[in-house]
Amino acid sequence: MLNLPWEKSKALQQRAYKVMPLGVNSNFRFWGEGITPYMQSAKGAYLWDADGNKYIDYRMGFGPIILGHAYDEVNEKVKTEIDLGTLSAMTYELEIETAEKFVKMCPGVEMIRFACSGTEATMHAIRVARAYTGRERIIKFEGMYHGFHDYTLWSTYAPTEAYGSCGNPISVPSSSGIPRQLSELITTLPFNNPDVFEKTLKSIGEQVAAIIVEPCMGNCGAILPVKNFLQFIRKQCDKYGIVMILDEVKTGFRVANGGAQEYYHIKPDLATYAKAFANGYPLAAFGGKKDIMSIIGHGVAQGGTFTNNKPGVAAAWATLTILDREPVIKTIEKRGKRLMDGIGNIFKESGIPFCMNGYPAMFSFAIGVEEVRDQRTWNESEKDYYLALIEAMIGRGVMPDHDAREPWFLCYSHSEADIDTTLDVVRGAVKVVKR
Ligand SMILES: Cc1ncc(COP(=O)(O)O)c(C=O)c1O
């Protein structure tokens, strides 16, 4: 249990309880009574909490920070642009330029529309897919998360028993308040299981508008797709006339400049983005094939007051410019790989069974298991031990997320020295936390 000198955080939590449910503005930010840090500032790879404690940050705001917190060049562009007006409810040239940069970097994206959050981006993509196919059912995978709207907030996180058998899974709503009737529009399947996937499509393939899939399980320990699984989804989508939506909200502009599409050489029909391309400012996007995107505005509704918010667009413009100009992803890859390997070696030396998952820019490890393929197998890992280790690291100034599902994220500002310090901290945590 975290026992840190967080007196100001504790006081802020008591104050926040009075005006915000759980004292936070997103359920995921609540770690518990007296153990929820409140923040003061962030710069580069570091965070300072309200009590002034400094951490090497591996949460990166749940992934958006790809360059570093408060990155000077991005902030300068935002400051310049907001002085020219933040919102006009009309289109700026800056937006067009940003869209052009975006399309140039993402191989499968011919046209895009901006949105404000990943939730909105996936919601819009699903509507477009339904309009394009004239069908209504959506397939998603257990343990994947596509935002807070009711259409896909199913089977994101539940005990394995709740999911029923692998061959005939039960779709579990992830919140009260989701209309039961929507269960008729969703099918949830275990990830990385081509047999169950193929069998399901044989029975309902012609009713399915879209399959939405994260390239890796970015909301469940960064489990990678087994070889050719994404390609198999692609082929089956073609066979049944289903729109393939690749949810790149976490992988976009993080695993490669062109995201998982570039990494796996795969072209979905639509893809969704929100995080890294604006380095922490609020901007999202969805895009894909021209013939699908072109139906927007021709009987298909999409829009929003803040979809071209100037701070978001300016930040995206600057972030894409830097990603294109500098070896951001390569640098992160090199440092992330050293961190992954180093953590793996510490576990090996300590005789702790584990499996390492994900990419250097976004990885995690599951303890006590040799392999994880989906949320069901991941549920068998030692999550209490993982949490105890993480808490020991936080107490020593290294902050991954408190939830084992959330990957460790790196950014361009993490230095070699930060990796060394982190490995020392991990070694120290492994020494004191007994399995
Ligand atoms: C893969 C994926 N899709 C969609 C979302 C929702 O994005 P947002 O929080 O911006 O609504 C998330 C958020 O973490 C995500 O990881």
Image (tube, rainbow, N blue to C red):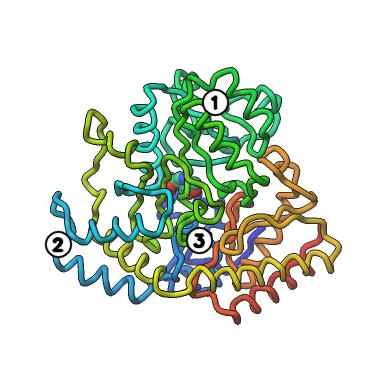
Q: Which residue position holds label 2?
A: 85
Q: Secondary structure at mark 2?
A: loop
Residue 27 visible? The answer is no
Q: Position of residue 251 (x, y in %)?
A: 50, 54
241 or 83: nearer the eye? 241
Q: Secondary structure at mark 3?
A: loop
Q: Nearer the viewer, residue 226 or 54?
A: 226
The span from disc 2 to disc 1 (Cα, nearest Å) is 44 Å
Tell me the kind of residue under disc 2: Gly
Above/below status of 218 relative to 432: above
Q: Is residue 358 above or below residue 228?
A: below
- Pick the quarter of the image with the C terminus: bottom right
- Say which of marks 3 and 2 sits in front: 3
User: Residue 256 has which mark?
Assistant: 3
Which label's residue is closer to the chain start, 2 or 1?
2
Q: Is 218 placed left or right of 38 in the picture?
A: right
